[in-house]
Image: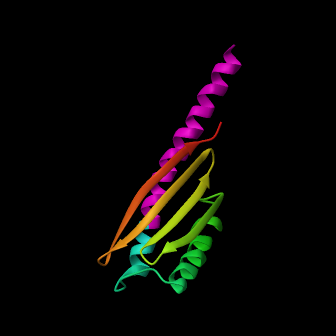
Amino acid sequence: MLTIFIGFIIENFKLSFDLKKVELINFKIINIISKIFSGKTDFDIFMINDLRRIFNEEFLNTKMLDKYELYKVDDSKIKVKYFKGHVIEELEILAYKGEIKLIEINKEVLE
């Protein structure tokens, strides 16, 4: 009984840690995109390639993310889906009049 309780506490701690990391990752994503986007009015294919390269360096190489998907929907919208531990986060990044807006579409906790 004690072992089950300790296991439950540890799993809750891991999940809480992963959820806090997701918030940090979202903050880093918006900072990275803001730097690349400065002075531009829309997303182009070269910017997407730069973002993939930077995401690989910042997130995958440092093991901050387990896996991510990044693709351009149209000239003003990018979708990002990433996996961190037991959490899957899906974001939409909008470019509107020279500003960046991050919208959380879905946050899912895997069992």
* Vertical comparison of 13 with 3: above or below: below
Q: Is residue 4 visible?
A: yes
* Vertical comparison of 34 with 66: above or below: below
Q: Provide residue 81's location: percent of width, then percent of height.
A: 57, 59
> Which residue of the protein is positioned furthest toward the front in this rendering?
74
Start and end of the magenta stretch? 1-29
Q: Quadrant of the C terminus?
A: top right
Residue 24 sits inside the magenta stretch:
yes
Q: Provide residue 93's location: percent of width, then percent of height.
A: 43, 66
The way the protein has been coloured in the rendering is rainbow
Q: Main secondary structure of the magenta part?
A: helix
Residue 107 sits inside the magenta stretch:
no
Closer to us: 9 or 85: 85
Q: Is residue 62 visible?
A: no
Q: Quadrant of the N terminus?
A: top right
* Vertical comparison of 89 with 41: above or below: above
> What residue do we see at 62% from left, 44% from top?
86
Question: Is residue 32 toward the left or the right of residue 68 in the image?
Answer: left
> What residue do we see at 57% from left, 71% from top?
71
Q: Provide residue 91's location: percent of width, then percent of height.
A: 48, 59
Q: Provide residue 4's location: percent of width, then percent of height.
A: 69, 20
> Which residue of the protein is positioned furthest toward the top in this rendering?
1
Please state the total of marks drawn on the protein image.
0
Residue 68 figure quarter? bottom right
> What residue do we see at 31% from left, 78% from top?
98
Closer to us: 30 or 91: 91
